[in-house]
Image: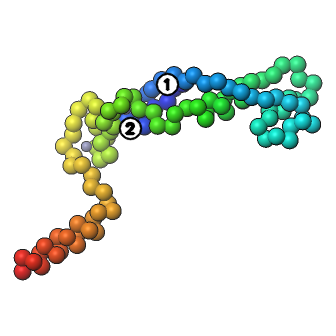
Amino acid sequence: MKTACRRCLADLEVEIEQLIQALFAEEENADDPAVYVIPPRATQLDLSEAVREELILAVPDYSLCREDCRGICPRCGTDLNTGTCGCQPESDPRWTQLERLKAASTDQEVD
Ligand SMILES: [Zn+2]
Ligand SMILES: [Zn+2]
């Protein structure tokens, strides 16, 4: 299945091996939501919807191109697997207030 690396967005092909069990029944027996309804007078079963739904569940939602993918820089967009950029690592905005407090109290101590 084609997908993209969650960190660097590179194209990826993920191999998926999945046993699919799908139950098909005629409409009057289909009170179970897991049952796929067979259309009246159908002579063929279309498995594509069942297969697609099961496959979506089987796709790992955190695919990486490799275990140690470094991703892209959130500031300049450089692919950090192929090079480095001059950006400082982004500090967590949740700490900004604390850092300000810390800076302020340090100033007071100096005074
Ligand atoms: Zn990657
Ligand atoms: Zn950067």
Question: Can you tell which quarter of the image residue 85 is in?
Answer: top left
Q: Is residue 103 left or right of residue 69?
A: left
Q: Is residue 15 left or right of residue 22?
A: left
Spot occupied by residue 96 in the image (x, y as percentages of width and height)? 27, 64
In this view, which residue lies farthest toward the top?
Answer: 43
Work out whether mark 2 precedes mark 1 in sequence or the reverse, and give the earlier one: 2
Circles 2 and 1 in contact, beta carbons < 8 Å: no
Q: Is mark 2 within 8 Å of ligand 1?
A: yes
Tag 2: amino acid = Arg
Residue drawn where x is 26% and y is 29% of the image: 82
Whether residue 79 can be seen here? no
Quadrant where the image shows the N terminus = top right
Residue drawn where x is 52% and y is 33% of the image: 60
Q: Which residue is mark 1?
A: 14
Q: Which residue is mark 2?
A: 7
Tag 1: amino acid = Val
Question: Can you tell which quarter of the image residue 71 is in?
Answer: top left
Label 1 neighbour load within 10 Å: few <14, some 14-19, many 20+: some
Spot occupied by residue 94 in the image (x, y as percentages of width and height)? 33, 62
Residue drawn where x is 37% and y is 28% of the image: 66
Depth order, front residue of 4/77: 4
Q: Is residue 94 left or right of residue 52?
A: left
Spot occupied by residue 104 in the image (x, y as percentages of width and height)? 17, 74
Mark 1 element type: loop
